[in-house]
Amino acid sequence: GAVVSQHPSRVICKSGTSVKIECRSLDFQATTMFWYRQFPKKSLMLMATSNEGSKATYEQGVEKDKFLINHASLTLSTLTVTSAHPEDSSFYICSAREDRYNEQFFGPGTRLTVL
Amino acid sequence: AQTVTQSQPEMSVQEAETVTLSCTYDTSESDYYLFWYKQPPSRQMILVIRQEAYKQQNATENRFSVNFQKAAKSFSLKISDSQLGDAAMYFCAYRSPLYGGSQGNLIFGKGTKLSVKP
């Protein structure tokens, strides 16, 4: 099956710093990618939909200036958590929708810890 | 807006036995897709099975099968011959068709934690 990678898998940062998470579709093109957030023992919550070459669409309640999304190519989307605070600590998961057959594939996730 | 409900926060099954996980959803759309995802402790989301709403036949993948009741808006997952490796969180998910303006994002239920007893 198609593979989606996320980097880094785990990151610890100090409060006030910015962290960038990369999501790559390794063997397929993905015009559309999704960013989810998952709290411990909770479900996945859609944060935003990322489209190549255009601005991301954010879900209600998600601060677009805090969670910057860039989808500069058909295989890469990035999520930057700006001025991170401890409440931003969470598990972030991306998924990529394969262009040909519209199947969606998930990355392995990134655990962010803000001290 | 569409919603997905999983009413069983936790379930337990004896190894080699059968277990059924429940899922109901609410939608006004007639065409859509339903999924069951497995999330083991590694937290990698794994697609277990999918069902297209226009198909009357229930989807089956080896030991996994669904009972899709469109009128009742019910989509349960049956796991036969349960194995220790089946222990995980299971999420039911809904997706709208792409032609309706949706970009294909998934709407998840809250999940059911399945334990398998040896």
Image (tube, helix red, strand yellow):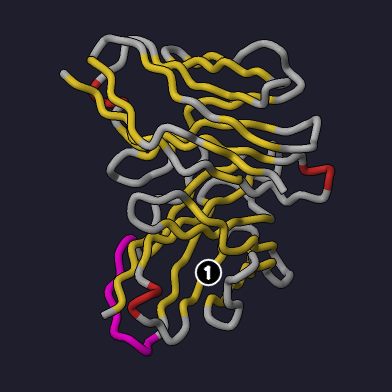
The verdict on residue A11 being magenta is yes
x, y percent for residue B113: 34, 35
Where disc 1 sits, the SS reads strand
Chain bearing tag 1 is A
**Looking at the picture, how far across and down is residue A93, in whole percent?**
46, 56
Residue B91: percent from the left, percent from the top?
47, 37
Q: Nearer the viewer, residue A35 or A103?
A: A35
What amino acid is at disc 1? Answer: Thr
Number of disc labels = 1
Residue B75 vs residue A5, the one in the foreground: B75
Q: Which residue position is annotated with label 1? A: A78
Q: Position of residue B16 (x, y in %)?
A: 26, 10
Is residue A76 rendered to the left or right of residue B98?
left
Q: Nearer the viewer, residue B98 or B31?
A: B31
Residue A24 shows in this picture: no
Q: Quadrant of residue B15?
A: top left
Q: Is residue B68 visible?
A: yes
Residue A91 is left or right of residue B96, and the answer is left
Residue at horizontal 47 percent and vertical 83 percent from the top:
A82
Residue at figure coordinates x 69%, y 66% from the top left: A57
Give the quarter of the image for residue A21.
bottom left
Which residue is situated farthest in the left direction here? B118
Relative horizontal placement of residue B38, taking residue B76 as reference (left or right): left
Q: Which residues are magenta?
A: A9-17
Residue A94, magenta (yes or no): no
Image point (64%, 65%), residue name:
A59
Q: Residues within 10 Å of mark 1 (few under 14, many from 20)?
A: many
